[in-house]
Image (spheres, helix red, strand yellow):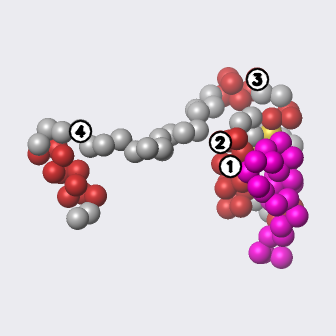
Amino acid sequence: MGIRNARSRFSERNIKPPKLAISLDAMAKLTTKARNRLPEGSFALLGRRYPIEDIVHARNALARVSQDGTPAEQVKVRRKVSRLYPELGVNSARQSSCD
């Protein structure tokens, strides 16, 4: 049974589908006003790129830089995230596969 069928079964019976155990919106919305108030140290790169003010944003910064960043940027972001959030277990010495 696919998700579409499961959802239609719930709606046919007027029953709300069960909520996920983990919210898909776990990362707090960072408004422009709040982002502008963050100190420079709350960003992984100069130019106020990749905010890492909490662990959820740090994970997101790692994901974004691995998609869009240069190998040098990836190393810098990994290094800063591993220094601020050692519990993530990020290996800052890992080299990019693009080399």
Which residue is under mark 4? Answer: 16
Give the x, y percent position of residue 60. 66, 48
Measure the C-alpha gap from mark 3 to mark 2.
Answer: 18 Å
As helix, strand or loop, the secondary structure at mark 3 comes to helix
Which of the pair 8/22 is nearer the observer?
22
| Callout 2 touching callout 4 (CB < 8 Å) | no
| Camera-side mark, 1 or 3 | 1
Residue at image point 47% right, 41% down: 23
Which residue is under mark 3? Answer: 37
Measure the C-alpha gap from mark 2 to mark 4.
Answer: 28 Å
Which of the pair 35/23 is nearer the observer?
23
Q: Which mark is residue 7?
A: none
Where residue 73 sits, quadrant-wise, is: bottom right
Measure the C-alpha gap from mark 1 to mark 4.
Answer: 31 Å
Q: Which residues are magenta?
A: 74-99
As helix, strand or loop, the secondary structure at mark 1 comes to helix
